[in-house]
Image (spheres, rainbow, N blue to C red):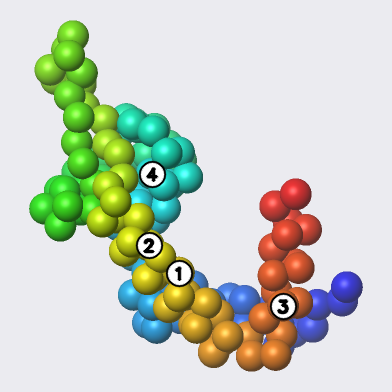
């Protein structure tokens, strides 16, 4: 599969299109990771996997907690230790975001959207 210059330009612009059309943010990335794990996860684990600083996680997680998209649990043995887990409301929120992302994907890549999907499959296998 040959990738031409126009396709690479479209790929490079996709990240900004996600923010513009779908409103995809760092908070959404945290939720996607929490959904993928489907268990309680520590702040350190989140920071490691989505490559953000703990201070940025604290702010974003606080907003997600406030919106009831994420829930916080404390360790029974050590109350200082916390973990996060996605809520049902968070799952529904991501379902809506997924629809917007797919629309953004089609806007950005048009008829080449399936070609990009194949490209991603090859990269991540």
Mark with earlier residue (2, 4)? 4
Number of disc labels: 4
Query: What kind of element bears circle 3?
Result: helix
Residue 31 in view of the camera: yes
Task: Name the residue beneath numbered marker 3.
Answer: 114
Residue 45 left/right relative to 86: right
Spatial CA distance of label 4 from label 1 is 15 Å
Spatial CA distance of label 1 from label 3 is 16 Å
Mark with earlier residue (1, 3)? 1
Q: Identify the residue shown where x is 79% and y is 83%.
A: 4
Spatial CA distance of label 4 from label 3 is 27 Å
Q: Identify the residue shown where x is 45% and y is 38%.
A: 37
Q: Identify the residue shown where x is 26% and y is 56%.
A: 89
Spot occupied by residue 94 in the image (x, y as percentages of width and height): 37, 62
Callout 3 crowding tier (Cα within 10 Å): few <14, some 14–19, many ≥20: few
Discs 2/3, front: 2
Closer to us: 1 or 104: 104
Query: What kind of element bears circle 4?
Result: helix
Query: What kind of element bears circle 1?
Result: helix
Q: Quadrant of the N terminus?
A: bottom right
Spatial CA distance of label 1 from label 2 is 6 Å
Closer to us: 2 or 75: 75
When the figure is inspected, residue 17 is found, relative to residue 37, above or below; the finding is below
Task: Name the residue beneath numbered marker 1.
Answer: 98
Which mark is on residue 94? 2
Callout 1 crowding tier (Cα within 10 Å): few <14, some 14–19, many ≥20: some
Spot occupied by residue 64 in the image (x, y as percentages of width and height): 20, 53
Mark with earlier residue (4, 1)? 4
Which mark is on residue 34? 4
Image marks 1 and 2: residues in contact by CB distance under 8 Å = yes
């Amino acid at each position: 599969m040959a990738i031409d210059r126009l396709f690479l330009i479209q790929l490079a612009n996709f990240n900004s299109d996600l923010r513009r059309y779908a409103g995809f943010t760092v908070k959404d990335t945290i939720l996607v990771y929490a959904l993928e794990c489907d268990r309680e996860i520590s702040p350190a684990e989140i920071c490691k996997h989505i490559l953000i600083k703990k201070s940025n996680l604290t702010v974003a997680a606080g907003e997600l907690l406030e919106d009831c998209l994420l829930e916080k649990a404390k360790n029974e043995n050590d109350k200082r230790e916390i973990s996060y887990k996605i809520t049902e409301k968070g799952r529904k929120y991501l379902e809506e975001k997924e629809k917007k992302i797919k629309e953004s994907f089609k806007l950005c890549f048009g008829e080449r959207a399936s070609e990009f999907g194949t490209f991603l499959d090859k990269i991540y296998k």
